Amino acid sequence: MKKRTYTEAHARSGLSEKLPAIECFENQFPGYEISIEIPEFTSICPRTGLPDFGKITIVYTPARLCLELKSLKEYLLAYRNLGIFNENAVNRILKDVVGAARPVRARVRGEFNPRGGISLVAEARHPRR
């Protein structure tokens, strides 16, 4: 039986690739929450090359800036051809959202479709605990 090996390259795949910028606009109101749902998120498993499908939900409390949705869509569409593990995709999206908008708090949740009878849910929060 052939042993499967996951390499450092698999683990880090997709974490440093250049993606489209997420643009923002000035927030006009304090103290509210925004929820954005992306029901057709896709990426590529870096180990198998097979597509992964899932739903991404971004919930954040804006400070000075709000995420501009067209640029966010272009950013997320870039994952379609990106080899990245699901857990890393959720954490990278959070990092990039926080880097762009500097929200008071944010949460990214990825609910990925089953593969081989196993489904995955990953959630990352800002600030980190």
Image (cartoon, helix red, strand yellow):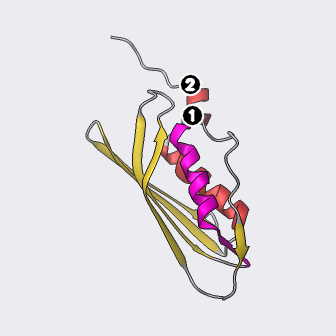
Q: Is residue 118 left or right of residue 127?
A: left
Asked whether residue 123 is drawn in magenta, I would say no
Question: For residue 28, what is the image quadrant?
Answer: bottom right
Question: Furthest-front residue in view?
Answer: 70
**Where is the C terminus found, in terms of image quarters?**
bottom right
The residue sitting at 54% across, 37% down in the picture is: 81
- Disc 2 from disc 1: Cα separation: 6 Å
Question: Which element is circle 1 on?
Answer: helix
Q: Main secondary structure of the magenta part?
A: helix
Tell me: residue 93, above or below residue 114.
below
Label 2: few (<14), some (14–19) or many (≥20) C-alpha neighbours in 10 Å: few
Q: Is residue 67 left or right of residue 47?
A: right
Q: Are marks 2 and 1 in contact (CB under 8 Å)?
A: yes
**Where is the N terminus found, in terms of image quarters?**
top left
Question: Which element is circle 2 on?
Answer: loop
Of the numbered discs in the image, which one, if any, rests on residue 56?
A: none
Q: Is residue 30 left or right of residue 49?
A: right
Task: Inspect this view and state whether residue 30 appears.
Answer: yes
Tell me: residue 87, above or below residue 60.
above
The residue sitting at 46% across, 45% down in the picture is: 42
The residue sitting at 65% across, 77% down in the picture is: 62
Question: Furthest-left residue in view?
Answer: 117
- At label 2, the amino acid type is Thr
Q: Which residue is mark 1?
A: 11
Q: Which residue is mark 2?
A: 7
- At label 1, the amino acid type is Ala
- For the residue pair 56 and 127, the one nearer the viewer reads as 56
- For the residue pair 4 and 33, the one nearer the viewer reads as 33
Task: Inspect this view and state whether residue 84 appears.
Answer: no
The residue stretch that appears in magenta = 64-81
